[in-house]
Image (tube, rainbow, N blue to C red):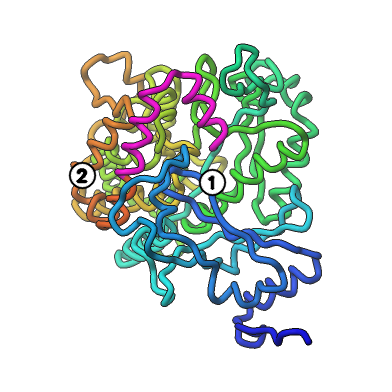
Amino acid sequence: MRDRPSGTTIHQLGATARRVLERAELEGIELIRFLYADHGGVIRGKAASRSRLAERLNTGIGHTVAMMAMNMLDQLQDVEHMGPVGEVRIVPDPATYVTLPHAPGAAAMVSDLRLPDGSPWGACARTFLKDAIAELATEGYTLVAAFEPEFTLGRRLPDPSGGPDRLVPIDDSLCYANTGFDTAHDYTIKLIRALETQGLRVEHYHPELGPGQQELSVHHAPALRAADNHVLYRETVRGVAMRMQLWASLAPKPLADQAGNGAHLHLSLWRDGRNVFAGDSETRDGFIGGLLAHLPALTALTCGSVNSFRRLTPRMWSSAYAVYGPDNREAAVRVCSPLGETGEPNLELKPSDSSANPYLSLGAVIHAGLDGIRRKLDPGEAVDVDPDTRPGRYQRLPSSLDEALDALEGDEVLMEALGPLRRSAYLTVKRSEAAAFAAEDASFELFHHLRAF
């Protein structure tokens, strides 16, 4: 005699959740991944079977609190309240449900980490962004954002000398060269189709500067959706490559002697249906002033890995100075010219990459910009030259993860926004990564970053 099904029934779920169940049935989905981003910047999760999905949409999947004290090397750190005792739930957001074309029979949802009673957990990164969005709304603003990621496409091969695996780029084409389009064509078409299937509208694509380097951008979205999109983007870029016996890495610097991979963050601020950056220079300047004032600390969250600081060096078009300027691609904050008569102005934060947890990164950016608006911070002079050509004139950004973490610990606004549990865990995890990689050679660092990201 079969046991009677237990737990939530379909009739107890909301309309969006019921549509998820219907889609999973119609599309023949067997496993649904519940994904989240951890303090190491790694996308992790668990999967529910379709037969238990109705229940798991409500209860989530049980998870140890200790996982948010795990660094990107899978080394568990000693963080108070994140040990062997304690439970959270990985609770999916049904509005983020997507099928995974590169993994037939699988789908995914982005998730929150909640306490067993359903309340928010103080270490959930996605909740941090939600709270930042809510704080911005108290001033009447909403933020629209898009990540602009680069990645390196190639093959992961064993090192002939017996060291860690290495990434061999798919080509050695020149920047924007048509041969680069041709070499990566089959992969790119499959990637675009997979992203579009998931509702991520592709804006443009081109082969970038380094061997095997690609850049493919998706359309902007409200802040939470933009961060969710970046999680799905990262996993789809890598998943499609694996299905084709390739390897894609969004690590900031997977190849030490080649161009780095950024994930520039584009931002526009809206109020009453209009782009504030289009006509309100005081608000725009205050937002820029806030970004610049907090930028040394922000880099600990927007460029969240040891490997990030191989990329953030002068004259590499990655931004190494806390300056802003119109269409200045060596400035940390670029004021972008609108495209055509109907284009909307936006800001581009260049010290940003895909090793960062996108929820912590974007949430911290909101808090920094909002602080600048509230205090009417002056961003100073706009810089229209490469800042490195004027030695000693402009503030240099941190040159290591440890230096950035020092700045974060000294930033009262961002530390207060992160909250006690989240900031304690983040700082501990990131300090452990800095120490672990300092004890190893460059090949160890490069391998573990190309593997994780």
Amino acid type at mark 1: Gly
Left or right: where 261 falls relative to 295: right
Secondary element type, mark 1:
loop
Disc 2/disc 1 C-alpha distance (Å) = 35 Å
Q: Name the residue under label 1.
A: 343
Principal secondary structure, stretch drawn in magenta = helix
Residue 170, image x, y percentages = 71, 22
Secondary element type, mark 2:
loop
Given residues 365 and 111, the one toward you in this image is 111
Residue 374, image x, y percentages = 22, 55
The quadrant where residue 22 appears: bottom right
Given residues 418 and 394, the one toward you in this image is 418
Left or right: where 125 falls relative to 450: left
Does the segment drawn in magenta span residue 337? no
Residue 438, image x, y percentages = 36, 24
Q: In this view, does 97 lie above or below 373?
A: below
Going from N to C along the chain, the mark reached first, 2 or 1, is: 1
Does the segment drawn in magenta span residue 449? yes
Q: Crowding near pointer 2: few (<14 within 10 Å), some, many (20+)?
A: some
Q: Is residue 2 above or below residue 385?
A: below
Residue 30, image x, y percentages = 75, 63
Q: Mark 2 points at which residue?
A: 411
Q: Is residue 148 above or below residue 163?
A: below
Q: What stretch is highlighted in magenta?
A: 427-453
Amino acid type at mark 2: Asp
